[in-house]
Image: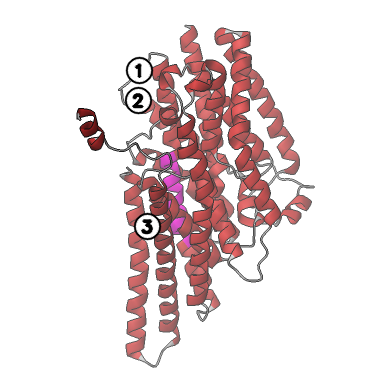
Amino acid sequence: MHVLAAASTTTPPAPFVDWGLMGKIALVSIIAGVGLVVAFSIGLAALSVARANHRSAPLRVVSVVLSVAMVAVVVGALVWGLELIVHKS
Amino acid sequence: MHNSLLLLIVVVVALAFDFTNGFHDTANAVAPTIATGALKPRVAVALCAALNLVGAFLSLKVAATIASALVSQDLVTLPVIFAGLIGAICWNVTTWYFAIPSSSSHALIGGVIGAMVVSAGGHAVLWSGLVSKVIIPAGIAPLVALVAAAIAVVAARSLTSKVDHDTSTKGFRIGQIGSSSLLSLAHGTNDAQKTMGVVTLALIANGSLSANASTPKWVVVSCAAAIGLGTFFGGWRIIRTLGKGFTHLTPHQGFASQIASSAVILTSSHLGLPLSTTHVVTGSIVGVGAATPHQPVRWRLVGNVALAWLITLPCAGLAGAICYFLAHAIGGTWGVVVLALVAAAVLGVLFKMSRNGSVNALNVNDTLGEADEADANPVAAV
């Protein structure tokens, strides 16, 4: 009885290969990598639109704001990457 | 006296490994940046070296030594560390000579395990740790990077298809400098600390440091200097393989591959399973090439590099085992001294041979065939 009770509360042994962790690394890496490239590309496209549109002031303002916002996202991510390097787990 | 001499040799050899680690892995951070013209070769390598140096000081948390999860730490001796380091250096220099990007970490792990098997037997190696923490992640790292980079480059191409060429090229090149810098910092932090761990382990094994003592400042400074100097010398051969060998990189491809590499390396490191920078960067470069229509990827070269990755652990292990056996056969500290001199002589010959087909800052951006022609009139460089 005691043995059964002990067995039921014992934590299962760690898996030989932590596939869950590997999957998490793959998923987060792909989302982060693709997301940053998408953000930077949108920023460049918006910058190009802003440069090309001399007539439509509102479109130009929106493009510049979008461009700055997207580049800020990428710069923020790089700074966060630096933070991860400094305070690595 | 003998222990002090042995310790001194081990520390010097560890710093030599750190140096080879630096010049072997320069390519990981700068190859796409140089290949796309985002930075001039010398500038890119100098920036990478400076950031590797800074990176070595950034985090005070020294990475766990490779021994902790892979071999029984109480059986680690100075000759084992020495033989493992010599095995790793031999593999690093050999793969550099043949311009093959391979993992310095795997070379070190292989070398130490080989020496350990001869020293204490197979039971001293934690084989399950080797499979779960080294071999399986080594297979997954390039695949994850390849997929991330392939999706990223398709997205970048689609989103910037109507952007004028100058804005696109200039923008992605600037982005490349940022991502390359981040990779260099991450490399300095991870790899310099790996050698710091080895030197600290040697000091502990020799009784010069208590088991729970922190890493001495001189170890931190010397390891940072060694990896920075090694990076500054620039492993031009491997830079050419990564930047021009697999495929032709354009700025948006270079940016996509470097951001994908940074994402994989930082995510894996943060989640506690650091992956090989070399495997990740190679995977992402091949990924951007494979995802671009009508762009050839040299799959034969990819296959050769993959084969080199497969044999890194056993070859470095064999070198480490032979080194330990010979040092032990000669006996004592003098065995280590003789072997260190022989290894230095062999590596010197290899460096001299490399001058005949030198790749340098001037011809690093030539395609493989063009560079071979340029070898007829080589400019002295590493």
**Is disc 2 in contact with disc 3, using a CB cutoff of under 8 Å?**
no
The residue that mark 3 highlights is A78
Residue at the far front: name it: A1
Residue located at (55% from left, 41% from top): B103
**Residue at 53% across / 34% down in the picture?**
B19
Q: What's the CA distance linking mark 2 and mark 3? A: 31 Å
Q: Residue under mark 1: which chain is it in?
A: B
Instruction: For the residues labelled 1 and 2, say whether their Cβ atoms are less than 8 Å apart.
Output: yes
Residue range highlighted in magenta:
B176-190
Please determine whether, in this image, residue A70 is positioned above or below residue B377. Answer: below
Amino acid at circle 3:
Leu
Q: Secondary structure at mark 1?
A: loop
Residue B183 lies in the magenta stretch: yes
In the figure, B336 relative to B176: above or below?
Answer: above
Q: Nearer the viewer, mark 1 or mark 2?
A: 1
Q: Chain of mark 2?
A: B
The amino acid type found where label 2 is placed reads Pro
Tell me whether marks 1 and 2 sit on the same chain.
yes
Rounded to the nearest whole Å, what is the CA distance between mark 3 and mark 1? 38 Å
Would you say the magenta stretch is mainly helix, strand or loop? Answer: helix
Checking the image for residue B209, the label placed there is 1
Distance between the alpha carbons at the discs numbered 1 and 2: 9 Å
SS at mark 2 in the image: loop
Secondary element type, mark 3: helix
Residue B230, can we see it?
no
Q: Position of residue B252 (x, y in %)?
A: 53, 67
Question: x, y percentage for residue B325?
Answer: 61, 16
Where is residue A43 drawn, in percent x and y? Answer: 40, 73
